[in-house]
Amino acid sequence: MTEVVRPQTIPEHGSPIAQGDESGQEPQHIDKAALAGWLRIISGLILRHTRNDSASAELSLTQISVLGRLDRGGPMSSADLARIEQLRPQTIRNVVDGLRDRGLVVGTRDTVDARRIQLALTEEGRGWVRGLRTTATDTFLTRALAEQLAPSEMVTLAAALELLERVAFAPSTHRGTPPG
């Protein structure tokens, strides 16, 4: 495994977290704006690296987001998806049509309101979301994880991803508006 030099702080800004004392107490101060900026930079770098992966290039970021939303939230209507993803109904229809054409999503009539179609992942769609596709073994991220992280670091990353998933799927009624 190649040794990687990792910055311990955000360059020129210091750590966004003021360390607590050695007794294991919570940190005294967390600079949320600096932490968000750091996350934005790292997310952007990962996104740029993965954009050219054959597994990722098959679907748009919006399609990937919709698959994740259906995996996490279960079946929902295209109107609900449009609202949650903050997309126009026409846009979500095109996104869903593309996913349906690939066999990743299926629509069924709502049992309560037959006018509504509930969208759900197919088994292939669920497999795509969970990385079970055969091409997913040769992606940038798979290789980088294997080459750069020790098994214990992968466990730490998995715990951090659970937190990031909560952030990513949080209701976003004020997107683009800084917290007040």
Image (spheres, grey):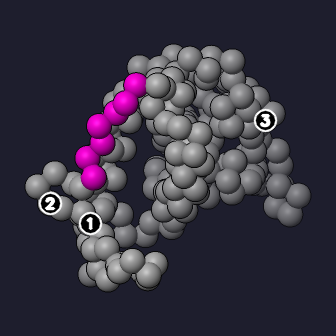
* Residue type highlighted by circle 2: His
Q: Which mark is residue 16?
A: 1
Gap between marks 3 and 2 measured at Cα: 46 Å
* Residue type highlighted by circle 3: Thr
10 Å crowding of disc 2: few (<14), some (14-19), many (20+): few
Q: Is residue 87 above or below residue 151?
A: below
Q: Which residue is mark 3?
A: 122
- Magenta span has 88? no
Which segment is the magenta one? Answer: 2-8
Numbered disc total: 3
Q: Is residue 24 visible?
A: yes
Q: Nearer the viewer, residue 114 or 29?
A: 29
Q: Nearer the viewer, residue 45 or 119?
A: 45
Q: Is residue 121 above or below residue 103?
A: below
Q: Which residue is mark 2?
A: 13
Q: Is residue 104 left or right of residue 142?
A: right
Point 66% across, 31% down: residue? 131
Image quadrant in which you'd find residue 66: top right
10 Å crowding of disc 3: few (<14), some (14-19), many (20+): some
